[in-house]
Amino acid sequence: MVHTCCTPKAEKERIFSEAADLGAGYVRVDVELDGIFTGLGPHWGGLDQVIALSKQYDLPVLAVLLTPRNYDDADEFASRSGEIVEHAGSAIDHWEVLNEPDGDWAFAGTAEDYARILSATYDAIKAKAPGATIVLGGLMRPHEPEWLQRVFDTPGADAVHKFDIANVHLRGPVDAVVRRYGEFRSWLAERGFTGPLWVTELGYAADPAFQSDPAYRGGDAPQAAYYTQALLGLGEVGAPQVFATLHDGGLDGEYATEGLERLDETPGGDYPVTRRPSFAAVRRLVDDWDQLMAWRSEQREHEQGERVEQAKSALWSTDAGIARDKFREARAQVHTVQGDLARMARANRAARGDRASRAARVARADAAARKRSPRATARLERRLARARALFAGCRAALAWKSAIAHWHSQRAYDHAVAVALLKQRIAGG
């Protein structure tokens, strides 16, 4: 939110100072062509202030070349951009061609108009500064790439080869931000662009009324947590540069409080700053990036481990359930054979102890003799031995499979605990 044309010098200086304290890699600056070329000759004062501050704070600039919304003269835009690049010299070497050109609010021309502006400007800048880096205008709707497809399809523009860095603006829930980045990068690769993809606007409001992610609502602290998770998520998927909104820009709605700090103006012109917790959160990312990314990588490994162990536990639990059914069947079979032997024994005892008539005793004795023949008893005893062996095997299988299922379940739990601890570390808790 630095404008060469109309941001007061003291405010520019305060913003550069705060960006340096944040550990930022770049400051994104709007360079308005109509603020330089006014009809009375070029006015370089505002741009020169930015160049001086960039040198003073050793903080590179990403310069956004801008024109009024309804401007579509590609040749004039390219010519004037070339003059600006030549004036800046080596002080600025990253140049973005328009801001959100796919948004009607910013650019009234067609996709084809932008293709011609981009192509002509690329050629003009490279002619003045061959080593300069050209950045595609930040797209406000990367999830709707049809507009950019029209840019690429514009005859004679060769637009897909007229920028060095692609560029998107991302807002919304963390998961959507990270997903859209990856999807858009894949979309570009399918069309032949495999260079860097920057995110030159990432913002999230501190005002609960505009906190759109259900996981991050409630004011300043959720805003800080959002920046932590969004920036780490974009780092995971390979975003090389992400620009977090430094301060509130005096806009309305969801953009009114998405800065890391509030910048006020006093009558004395000293621009006091109130830093939000999100400032410290982003500064921590700058300072501890490698450690935080290592923790995030470890978190992902444990999450994968938890999923694997849960799946294994479920499989072994299923096997244990089958083993439990077999165990119950084997136990029932043992009880059945034991019951048959018990009934035979009772019949034998009844035959020996019955005091009824001799004829009845003889009849029962004959019947008992048939029942207690050695062959029948031996068969029952063999059946019982087999049933007991099967029962023992089923019991061992049940114990083994249940133990393995429990072991995998415990390992899944250990992974879950590790994930929770890593999340807490990453969040700064």
Image (tube, helix red, strand yellow):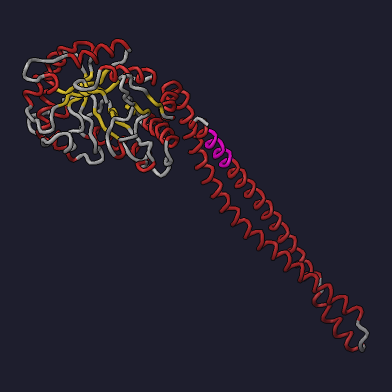
Membership of 420 in magenta stretch: yes
Closest to the observer, 141 or 411:
141
Residue 355 image-quadrant placement? bottom right
Magenta stretch in the rendered image:
411-421
Dominant secondary structure of the residues highlighted in magenta in the image: helix
Above-or-below relation of 14 to 176: above
Residue 419 image offset from top left, x and y in percent:
52, 36
Above-or-below relation of 71 to 315: above
Instruction: Quadrant for the N terminus, please.
Output: top left
Q: Relative to residue 405, is residue 301 drawn left or right?
A: left
The residue shown at (24%, 15%) is 50
Q: Relative to residue 370, is residue 201 drawn left or right?
A: left
The residue shown at (13%, 30%) is 68
Closest to the observer, 242 or 55:
55
Residue 253 image offset from top left, x and y in percent:
29, 40
Closest to the observer, 404 or 97:
97
